[in-house]
Amino acid sequence: MIVWYDSIDSTNSEALRRLPELPSGTVLAAREQTSGRGQRGNTWFTEAGKNLTFSIVLKPSSLAAGEAHLLNYLASVAVAEFLEGYGVSCSIKWPNDIYVGRKKICGILVENSLSGGCVAASVIGIGININQTDFPQLANATSLSLATGCEYVLEDCLKAFMTVFEAWLPRLKDLPESYTSLLFQKGVQARYIDYLRDGEEFTGTIQGVSPDGRLIIKTDAHEERLYRFKEVGYIL
Ligand code: BTN
């Protein structure tokens, strides 16, 4: 079921508030978010009525806490395939920013509740820039409209996205392969910043992800380094 709000603080916050009563698979979508939340406590700004901002509630029956990264992969791969459906190729900037070329088109915020070593519930928040064409304060943002030159009906886009998303749900274990194949800068030598080593900058090449969801970067000195979220940054 998809529930549309004209205006709400944040679809993730609303899903978390209503979590006990919402069945798995419920989607809360907003035409406007007044306090959209992003990664690392950032605010997610989008122009009202122009973009998709929504949260999907999932209550997996048996997903171990150690496999929670599969939910990030699920959202990322589904967004990539959804955009592919409109003829737009994109890549996944680890862990879950979706890029068209070198510009961000979508951000994802997954918030999990764990219980007994399992993911009891997950709120998968997704913001996809659809019809917005001006990003005054965001130099590296883009949208579906900017990529294709067309305008879209948000409700139709969300239905199309959910079709792709739901098709992946029974195949979570197949996601790492698709996710890895879409990784931004995979196999390409680039600069990174290592927060585990006092912010040291280094040159390396992304190899893929480990079974527990860490990013693998091989340094120019052939050292393989594994990173969790916030332990490494891209120098773009
Ligand atoms: C990021 O890239 O920082 C993540 C952004 C996530 C934004 C989406 S929009 C729908 C959902 N509700 C929120 O408040 N945040 C997520």
Image (cartoon, grey):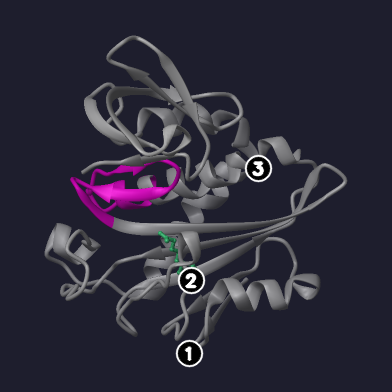
Q: Neighbour class for label 1 at 10 Å: few (<14), some, many (≥20)?
A: some
On screen, residue 135 above or below 47:
above
Which three-letter amino acid code belongs to the residue tagged 3?
Answer: Ala
The local secondary structure at tag 2 comes to loop
Choose the circle earlier in sequence order: 3 or 1.
1
The residue pinned by badge 3 equals 68
Q: Neighbour class for label 2 at 10 Å: few (<14), some, many (≥20)?
A: many
Image quadrant containing the C terminus:
top left
Question: Nearer the viewer's eye, disc 3 or disc 1?
Answer: 3
Some atom of ligand 1 lies within 8 Å of the CB belonging to the residue at label 2 = yes
Image quadrant containing the N terminus:
bottom right
Task: Give yes or no for residue 124 being in the magenta stretch.
Answer: no
Q: Report the Cα–Cα distance between label 3 and label 2.
A: 20 Å
On screen, residue 218 above or below 71:
above
- Give yes or no for contact between labels 3 and 2 (Cβ–Cβ under 8 Å): no
Which three-letter amino acid code belongs to the residue tagged 2?
Answer: Arg
Q: Position of residue 132 (x, y in %)?
A: 22, 74
Q: What is the number of the mark on residue 37?
A: 2
**Bounds of the magenta segment:** 81-104
Task: Give yes or no for residue 83 being in the magenta stretch.
Answer: yes
The residue pinned by badge 1 equals 7
